[in-house]
Image (tube, grey):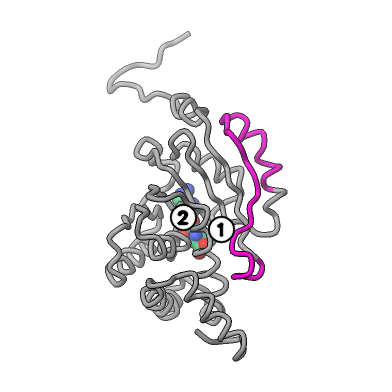
Amino acid sequence: MHGRTGFCGTIRLVGTAREVFGDALPIAERYAAFLAKAGVERGLIGPREADRLWERHLINCAVVSSAVPEDAQVVDIGSGAGLPGIVLAIVRPDLRVTLLEPLLRRTTFLNECVELLELRNVDVRRARAEDVVEEFAVDVATARAVAPLERLAGWALPLLRPGGELLALKGERAAAELQEAEPLLKGFGVRSAELLQVGRGMVDPPTTLVRVVAGRGEVVGRRQRAPRRAKGSRKRSS
Ligand SMILES: C[S@@+](CC[C@H](N)C(=O)[O-])C[C@H]1O[C@@H](n2cnc3c(N)ncnc32)[C@H](O)[C@@H]1O
């Protein structure tokens, strides 16, 4: 846990990492080491990120856990190298986490992480979010750096149970993205959509989340998908 932060910064980071990960810190350290080596070598993490893994990635993702209800079933959309999904699974063994990721190179890496870290609460699923709508009705969907909110919400809301939550980790454009997504969110009949900051005093800047609570609209959205025609059936002419 070193790099560009300097001595005092490193001491502060160590304290924060201990506070955030608690007993799970040794597992988080193993994950950080794997990201810094295999993650960088295989191009899943930029080489410049290796020096700032803790503040920009691990702690930044771990603080999202304060917004996730106990015992929740979580789908992490576009997990990449496991952010935030692996981190949430490490810090919260009560969660059941599915890492949803379409690229084989990345799912291979994720499966290796699960084995290396001996995570019993994680599944890896190789697929695009929009292709697995019928398989999930989860409590929470997370996503970081996957797509603009408007597109992401269209993928995530159909994966949630009514009352389930999308927690999208967003940067400076969070408020603008939320505004742009409003018509779509209304169409899905969401209960609420708001900005939320987590990890104040632990990460600088704190992590910004867009939290969208699903109504019943997403179920309607699911039913509105074009029904599959039975084998051999003909398109009716009007
Ligand atoms: C920029 S990476 C971010 C990875 C990780 N969440 C992070 O913050 O480091 C975006 C990821 O989203 C995945 N992705 C793109 N389209 C997707 C879709 N339709 N469904 C699920 N994942 C998708 C990509 O394969 C890629 O791994």
Residue drawn at 55 percent across, 46 percent down:
152
Check mark 2 vs ligand 1: CB closer than 8 Å? yes or no.
Answer: yes
- Residue 190, how many percent across, how many down? 57, 33
Q: Amino acid at mark 2?
A: Gly
Image quadrant assignment for residue 170 = bottom right
CB within 8 Å, label 1 to label 2 = yes
Q: Crowdedness of circle 1 by 10 Å Cα count: few (<14), some, many (20+)?
A: some
Q: Which residues are magenta?
A: 177-205
| Of 170 and 207, the residue lying toward us | 207
Check mark 1 vs ligand 1: CB closer than 8 Å? yes or no.
Answer: yes
Residue 78: assigned label:
2
| Of 212 and 149, the residue lying toward us | 212
Locate residue 219 relative to residue 197 in the image: left or right.
Answer: left
Residue drawn at 48 percent across, 52 percent down:
68
All told, the count of numbered labels is: 2
According to the picture, the residue beneath numbered tag 1 turns out to be 145
| Of 191 and 56, the residue lying toward us | 191
> Is residue 34 on the magenta stretch?
no
Considering only vertical position in the picture, is 223 above or below 87?
above
- Residue 17, how many percent across, how many down? 50, 75
